[in-house]
Amino acid sequence: MNQDKTSPKYLDNASTTKVDDRVLKEMLPYFTMLFGNASSNHEYGKIAKQAIEKARFQCAEIINSNPDEIIFTSGSTESINLGIKGYLESNTEKGNHIITVRTEHKAVLATCEYLETKGYEVTYLDVDENGLISLSELRETVKENTLLIVIMYVNNETGVIQPINEIGKIARENDVAFYCDATQAVGKIKVDIEKDLIDMLCFSGHKLNGPKGIGVLYKKNDIELTPLIHGGGQENGLRGGTYNTPSIVGFGKACEIAHQDMNKNINKVKNLNEHLVNSLEKITPFIEVSKKHLRVPNILNIIIPNLMSDIFIDKYSEVAVSNGSACNSSIMEESHVIKSMMQKKQYENKYLRISLDHFSTEEQIDIFIEVLNKHLNNA
């Protein structure tokens, strides 16, 4: 299979990415020949267990952590729930105040809203017109009973990169744990948990050309968690259940490839982004929701004043772009991220998120531009 033969109309890689052929090849034997249960003590089980530990090392290397700090989960949503709820339940003596941001992924916001019903106090930081938090506001918000700060690395709708290192310093200075959702960052930019003083972090396989249904929670060894899923004691007792060996193996391989090819992939995506922007400028006026130097190059969220994005997406559903997070697209509600940044009702339902990948091509972009131009001329 030629890996460059991607769908000619797929530009929604922030939602999910195609599985790399090399990843699939690595996974296949663990469905058939090497099918043992990794918790078994016989040879079949030991082979599977060794493959899982290799993947644990590969996942750790891309974020500069130790392999024994990696917990395999079903994806970032589970990792968010395990990290936040598990930490609060194990550290009740440290306080009951959580700090997060209004533009977080719904997995974080829904978890925090649930915790508020259980008596926890949550402060939701605002963002400026660039989608960034105020570090001074964060400092002022920390209280004696604050035990956890939850702030994402890269926003899934706008690509905005938060000042993670500075956030980590504020958390460390105040003896507060720092949880970072890095689902849209890992494999796209360099992520270093040691440098950024991150205590817990999550990311998913399907965002970096690995399989769906697999992710990790990184946690420092001195962080105590209460498990959400009890069972056979897998993952040091933090995540019971039979290991999904094929997906773990594929996830590890995806991390290895993303780590090795990161600089090459970043440069390719930057060039594709430039081609996309230049092509858009030829057909329509538009506003970039986030400034180029503040975001990752693979996500471009734009507002086209004379476009109704839901009508465009519905009419040309074969062209894969979005108007928000894939987790919310079926609800068709105004993006909480854009609403927090823009505060301008005239832009409602006028934004498109185009998200690239190193498997994306100029041909895909040209097809999207052609379809968009056709729609705008016929509107």
Image (cartoon, helix red, strand yellow):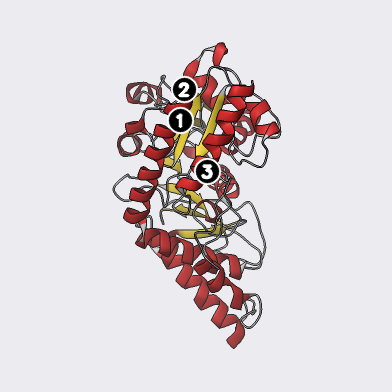
Type of amino acid at the residue the image marks with label 1: Leu
Q: Is residue 108 at all visible to an observer of this figure? A: yes
Q: How much space separates mark 1 and mark 3, taking CA atoms? A: 19 Å
**In screen coordinates, is 256 left or right of 316?**
left
Q: Which mark is residue 280?
A: 1
Where, quadrant-wise, is the N terminus in this rendering? Answer: bottom right
Residue denoted by label 3 = 14
Q: Which mark is residue 84?
A: none
Q: Position of residue 244 (x, y in %)?
A: 62, 66
Give whichever of 1, 139 is nearer the camera: 1
Q: Position of residue 352 (x, y in %)?
A: 55, 30
Residue denoted by label 2 = 286
Q: Position of residue 17 (x, y in %)?
A: 55, 52
Mark before the other along the chain sequence, 2 or 3: 3
Q: Residue at x 52, y 51 (%)?
A: 207
Q: How much space separates mark 1 and mark 2, taking CA atoms? A: 8 Å
Mark 1 neighbour class, 10 Å CA radius: few under 14, some 14 to 19, many 20 or more: many
